[in-house]
Image (cartoon, rainbow, N blue to C red):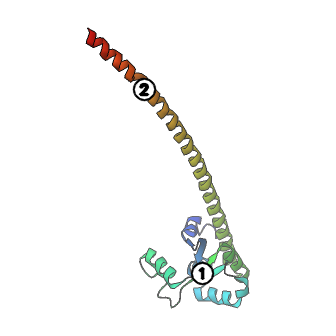
């Protein structure tokens, strides 16, 4: 099964909504090989397993924004906004969908979430390092500016020197 669904395909089905990385019920049902209504029916029968931080229904505005990103109604004219599942919710789905395909796909999805976390932490670490480098560059720039100012002062004659030079020329 892992050969059939590349991780890149799963990554493209993960969205950030309300600051959570989530997957749509329709995408999950496609991956699991069941109809969306079958997946949602199984979830409704086990609602106590899906608190708000595991699963939530999109608002009309969120749903419209998501549809707008795709340019068309990808969900075939649904009458209600889709449910989305966080990583924990996807994990919980494995306890109510027991087919071999669902279990294998669930393992792939969990690995994808882990890979995304690793990638994000790497980006954060790189961001911190870049910030430190920028700070050092700013400090070096200030020091270089100070050196150039000192050189300019040494190169341009002071007011006393200008007066002496001007005074000598008058006598001559």
In the image shown, does 77 or 170 lie closer to the viewer? 170
Disc 2, SS: helix
Neighbour tally class for label 1: few under 14, some 14-19, many 20 plus, Cα within 10 Å: some
The tally of labels here is 2
Name above or below for residue 147 compared with residue 98: above
Question: Mark 1 highlights which residue?
Answer: 29
Residue 145, numbered circle: none
Horizontally, is 16 left or right of 169 in the view? right
Residue, x 69% and y 70% (percent of image)?
A: 107
Residue 153, numbered circle: 2
Q: In which quarter of the image is the C terminus?
A: top left
Horizontally, is 132 left or right of 166 in the view? right
Q: Position of residue 151 (x, y in %)?
A: 44, 25
Q: In which quarter of the image is residue 153?
A: top left
In the image shown, does 15 or 128 lie closer to the viewer? 128
Kindly tell me whether residue 35 is visible in this rendering. no
In the image shown, does 131 or 146 lie closer to the viewer? 146
Residue, x 41% and y 27% (percent of image)?
A: 152
Instruction: Give the CA separation, mark 1 to mark 2.
Output: 74 Å
Q: Position of residue 160 (x, y in %)?
A: 39, 20
Name above or below for residue 117 compared with residue 90: above
In this rendering, the label closer to the viewer, 1 or 2:
2
Mark 1 or mark 2, earlier in chain: 1
Disc 1, SS: helix
Q: Position of residue 146 (x, y in %)?
A: 49, 32
């Amino acid at each position: 099964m892992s050969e059939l669904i590349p991780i890149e395909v799963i990554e493209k089905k993960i969205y950030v909504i309300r600051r959570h990385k989530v997957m749509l019920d329709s995408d999950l049902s496609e991956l699991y090989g069941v109809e969306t209504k079958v997946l949602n029916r199984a979830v409704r029968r086990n609602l106590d397993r899906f608190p708000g931080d595991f699963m939530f229904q999109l608002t009309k505005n969120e749903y419209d924004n998501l549809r707008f990103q795709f340019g068309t109604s990808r969900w075939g004219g649904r009458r209600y906004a889709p449910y989305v599942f966080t990583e924990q919710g996807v994990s919980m789905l494995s306890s109510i969908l027991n087919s071999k395909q669902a279990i294998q796909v669930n393992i792939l999805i969990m690995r994808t979430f882990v890979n995304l976390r690793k990638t994000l932490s790497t980006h954060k670490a790189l961001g911190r390092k870049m910030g430190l480098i920028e700070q050092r560059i700013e400090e070096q720039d200030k020091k270089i500016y100070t050196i150039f100012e000192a050189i300019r002062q040494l190169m341009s004659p002071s007011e006393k020197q200008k007066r002496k030079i001007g005074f000598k020329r008058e006598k001559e």
